[in-house]
């Protein structure tokens, strides 16, 4: 009887487990089905809403086009000048702070101080509309940065790193290439202004000291490599002469370049490979020295004349005025009409409840 009751209890437990699993799947699929239904009904509601108010929404877009066209034709042109720089040191935080400081002076209408800082006349500084800075980077560059970052981690840490999280946590000023922009009411040459913006960073004592230390270290490394290369070349010549002496005058006594073990033997090919490595390291040191010559490099610029820019930012995307105002008018009317529908629904609900 005991075995039968135990078997019966086990069958009951298994039945409960399968029932719980089945109920879990049912609830999961019901949840997915409810989400799909709600999305479908929401889409249908939006379609009927737009159909109901198609005239009002169309008029909003039409008036937005008219307003955008009038503003673009009647407003003073805004000229945009840009320059791209490469940071050879971590100057980004200072660079972004400087741009924020200049915009703060514009906001406070302190054109006199702005003119002194950037080497402008006070009249010219009054024509400046804004300063801006943004990183110059592509998705491919981000992927390369992510791969390089992950390679330095162990397998456990790699499994916990997500690409999107990594990208969202990168500060924009960390990217080496940055584009600085100036918007002005007049078409002027801002070449000196861009140079002064960069110059204010170049005179930072911390970066100057870091540059001196890097150049000294690289110079000493290069000189050590060059001395090693001379010694390697001399050793190769000596080795060749010894080989020729051994081949021409056989003798029981001679000079050898062998150690006590096979792995200590010096070979001509090994000397040649070592020579190549030294030359590559010298080339690499020269390249790094060239990069460290400037704290910030000016890559390219469009500051000579500037170009007309009437774009406005909308949710982080630049839009022309003719597109910007129709979008704004459409969203405003859409929100007003939705509020009206919601208010009507509340009134009907209170009426039915009452």
Image: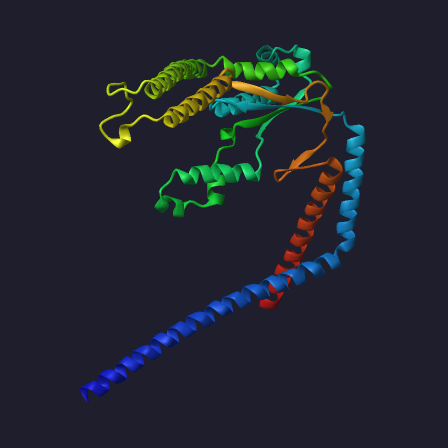
> Which quadrant, please, contains the N terminus?
bottom left
Q: How is the image coloured?
A: rainbow
Q: Residue 122 placed where, x, y %?
A: 65, 11
Task: Work out whether 50 lies above or below 314.
Answer: below
271 is higher (above) or lower (below) than 339:
above
Residue appearing at x 73%, y 25% in the figure:
307
Question: Going by the picture, which residue comes out furthest to the left?
Answer: 2
Q: Residue at x 58, y 63 (%)?
A: 38
Up-down: is 70 above or below 111? below
**Which image quadrant for residue 110?**
top right
Numbered marks: total: 0
Quadrant of the rendered image containing residue 225: top left
Q: In the figure, is residue 201 to the left or right of 317? A: left
Query: 342 and 28: which one is in front?
Result: 28
Query: Does the rendering let one see residue 201?
Result: yes
Measured as percent of width and height from the top left, residue 46 is found at 67, 58
For the view shown, which residue lies furthest in the bottom direction? 1
- Identify which residue is drawn at 61% across, 12% down: 115
Q: Nearer the viewer, residue 56 or 179?
A: 179
Looking at the picture, tell me which residue is in the foreground, 259 or 81: 259
Q: Which x, y percent locates residue 70?
A: 80, 34
Residue 238 location, x and y as percent?
A: 35, 16
Residue at 71% from the left image edge and 48% from the top image edge:
333
Instruction: Determine the image quadrant of residue 257.
Output: top left
- Give the left or right position of residue 143, taking residue 323 as reference: left
Q: From the viewer's side, name the closer residue of 263 and 312.
A: 263
In the image: residue 285, left or right of residue 126: left
Instruction: Tell me if I can see residue 110 in this picture.
Output: no
Quadrant for the C terminus in the image: bottom right
Reply above or below: 17 against 327: below
């Amino acid at each position: 009887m005991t075995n039968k009751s135990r078997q019966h209890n086990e069958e009951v437990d298994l039945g409960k487990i399968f029932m719980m699993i089945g109920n879990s799947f049912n609830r999961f699929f019901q949840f997915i089905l409810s989400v799909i239904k709600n999305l479908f009904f929401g889409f249908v509601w939006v379609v009927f809403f737009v159909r109901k108010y198609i005239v009002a929404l169309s008029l909003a877009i039409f008036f937005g086009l008219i307003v955008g066209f009038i503003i673009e034709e009647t407003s003073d042109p805004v000229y945009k000048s840009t320059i791209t720089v490469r940071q050879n040191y971590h100057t980004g935080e200072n660079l972004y702070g400087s741009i924020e400081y200049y915009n703060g002076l514009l906001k406070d209408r302190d054109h006199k101080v702005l003119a002194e800082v950037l080497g402008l006349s006070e009249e010219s500084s009054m024509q400046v509309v804004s300063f801006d800075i943004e990183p110059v980077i592509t998705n491919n560059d981000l992927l390369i940065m992510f791969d390089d970052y992950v390679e330095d981690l162990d397998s456990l840490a790699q499994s916990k790193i997500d690409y999107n999280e990594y990208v969202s946590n990168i500060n924009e000023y960390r990217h080496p290439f940055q584009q600085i922009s100036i918007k002005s009411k007049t078409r002027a040459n801002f070449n000196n202004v861009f140079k002064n913006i960069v110059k204010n960073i170049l005179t930072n004592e911390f970066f100057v000291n870091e540059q001196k230390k890097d150049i000294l270290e690289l110079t000493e490394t290069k000189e050590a490599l060059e001395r090693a290369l001379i010694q390697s070349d001399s050793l190769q010549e000596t080795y060749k002469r010894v080989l020729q002496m051994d081949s021409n005058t056989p003798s029981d006594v001679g000079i050898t370049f062998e150690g006590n073990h096979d792995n200590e033997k010096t070979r001509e090919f090994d000397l040649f490979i070592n020579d190549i490595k030294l030359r590559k390291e010298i080339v690499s040191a020269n390249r790094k020295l060239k990069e460290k010559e400037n704290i910030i490099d000016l890559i390219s610029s469009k500051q000579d004349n500037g170009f007309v820019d009437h774009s406005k930012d909308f949710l982080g995307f630049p839009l022309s005025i003719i597109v910007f105002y129709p979008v704004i008018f459409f969203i405003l009317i859409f929100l007003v009409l939705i509020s009206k529908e919601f208010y009507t629904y509340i009134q009907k609900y209170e009426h039915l409840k009452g």
